[in-house]
Amino acid sequence: MEHAAFLSYLTPGERVYIQDIQADESTRQRLHAMGLHRGREVQLIRRARFGGPLQIRVGSVTLILRRREAGYVKVSRCL
Amino acid sequence: MRTVALIGMPNTGKSTFFNRLTGASTRTGNWPGVTVDLKSAKILLGAEMVEVIDLPGIYDLQGYSDDERVVRDFLTHNSVDLVCLILNATQLDHQLSLALQFSRLDVDMLVLLNMADEARQLGMQIDTELLSKVLGSETRLLSARRGDGFPQSKDAITQHLRQATPVQLGAAVSDFGIIDALSGEVEALYKRSVQAPSILTPGITERIDRVLLHPWLGLPLFFLFMFLVFQAVYTLGTPLQDGVAWLLDGFKQVALEPLAPHIPRVVYGLLVNGVYDGVGTVASFVPVIILFFFMMSLIEDSGYLSRAAFLMDNLMSRLGLDGRGFVMLLMGFGCNVPALMGTRVMRSRALRLLTMLVIPFSLCSARLQVFVFMTTALFTPHQAPLVLFSLYMVSFLAVLLSALLIKGRLHSNEPFVLELPPYRLPQLRQVYFRGWHEVRHFLHRASKFIIAGVVIVWFLTHYPVASPPGGPDSFAGMLGQFLQPVLSPIGISAQMAVILVFGFIAKEIVLGSLVAMTGLQGAALSGYLSGHLSWVQGYSLMLFILLYTPCLSTVATMRSESRSLRYTAFSVVWALGVAWIFSFAFYQIAQRF
């Protein structure tokens, strides 16, 4: 993964940095409040089966979020 | 009176601290500018009475969720002497943003870094002096669960209040800077004030998650746990329930019945046969409800509930619901009332209303008791369990169809992002406080409603002609006649219609009212039922009982939780409609075979 991709496409265990959140203002604000914002390191821990939510780790916090929300988060392997 | 506002992110142990600080003396009440009840308590600190308010957990003072609005509205319209900000010491990389937001407000603040014991175990070192300086507010370590640092924190609050002046923040709460600008500041402050091992080891929580969130094992384990919880509640609860019923009946025989000759018959009938028996029937369910609440707060405290949401979210999202909604539906199989109250964790109102609309279709324990009796009376021992199972399936079907039909109108765009807290051993103290608080809330509401309901039913069945109670010449009987045009297409006779009126108050009264109406008990009543109802009529009646309004307590809870009379009325009408259509379809089709 040389160039940017979205959080929703990661494989479990992968660590990446957030480049951008491409969503409307209120979603962006919500994700920001949960610690998802530019520059943060994120690790995908696991996915629920059949396209269910993702479990991720951001800093000291473990979050679950739907694939739709993960699709807003643009990430890349380096800062 | 001084006012202290407790503020913090969800899962920081804010309520644990609140309970420790205030003991059991909490109340819920209204506050200016705020539309939901807030938990608060008055305590004596130093020489002054202080009111402590436990505000909902928020991630951000500027956010758009209901909870965030509540906190903003509270601070806008009420004056506070001290903001006590509780942060999770192990997650300061996230939580300092809230502290920085509050440090820009012109209000006295005390910052408590809770779960200091966990932070120490993780090898973190926190420079509270530096934090105090940068935030401009005293910052101290605390472990609200274990009590370390608690007396000092309490003293600190008392000290602050000695010099504090009440501040009403007004519009200042809503307009300060853009949150993006803070993130750099948060990172810089975190790096300076916290020393943490560069990689936090996965630890016990990740190891447990590997099993409990396992792609194949996760769901079966979840269902097994739920099954065990129900088993525990009813194995422990049923003897207690019988015990309470026995005590109430004993008291009636010893203390109340001897009074009968000395007071007017009408008064005795109303007070003893009406109020006492009616309230007693409901009271006998209190032990089960208490156990249920304690079990739920046990699971909640352990951190497993949000895992269940992870496991079930995919299926539920197709119904316009989410993972937490499934947990509430399961709780509804015990009792719909706590399940409705549990939807408070949802942040989007549309999502919450949709979830509350489908919860009453969960076949609760009170309905189960009616169905067990009726299936045994109307079907062979081989058929009965299958019939019962089919009712559970219908219950799911009604949830499914309702959610699919309504989800377009109660559409929620709220992003689904949920924190998974680490697993923790539930603390009995916390479970006790949570459970007890909910139980008191339930009793308070239920008692108001049920006494009124019982008095009305007694009146309807005893006037103008009382023999037999609920017979064709009583008001209830007339009501049954009146309802015939609606009920005969689904195979329910005028007499059985009266039972549905009773069942509206509480399903617990259904069997009792059958007894009162027919004057028969046990096997004789079973014989009466099988003689008067064909199996098709019986099943149609059970379908209706399963799906229409569960009980007045549910309606009352619906009203107080939704704060909308219109929505409550809609949910009652919706349930009646669904019940009638299911019964009608079944009765009309089954009759032709």
Image (cartoon, coloured by chain):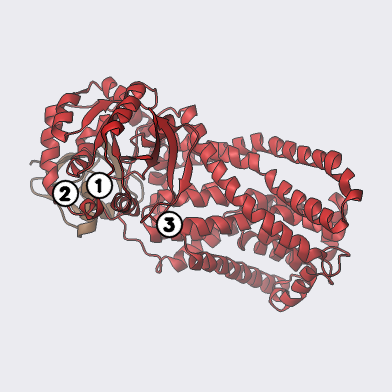
Chain colours: A brown, B red
Label 1 environment density (alpha carbons within 10 Å; few <14, some 14–19, many ≥20): many
Residue matched to label 3: B352
- Asked if the residue under mark 2 is in contact with the one under mark 1, i.e. CB atoms within 8 Å, the reply is yes
Q: Quadrant of residue B397?
A: bottom right
Marking on residue B24: none
Q: Nearer the viewer, mark 3 or mark 1?
A: 1
Marking on residue B179: 2
Does residue B577 show up?
A: yes
Whether residue B342 sits left or right of residue B187 in the image: it is: right
- Name the residue rendered at 35%, 37% in the picture: B11
Mark 2 chain: B
Does residue B195 show up?
A: no
Expressed as whole percent of the image width and height from the top left, the position of residue B225 reads 51, 37
Expressed as whole percent of the image width and height from the top left, the position of residue B229 reads 56, 37
CA–CA distance in space, label 2 to label 3:
28 Å
Quadrant holding the N terminus of chain B:
top left
Residue matched to label 1: B60
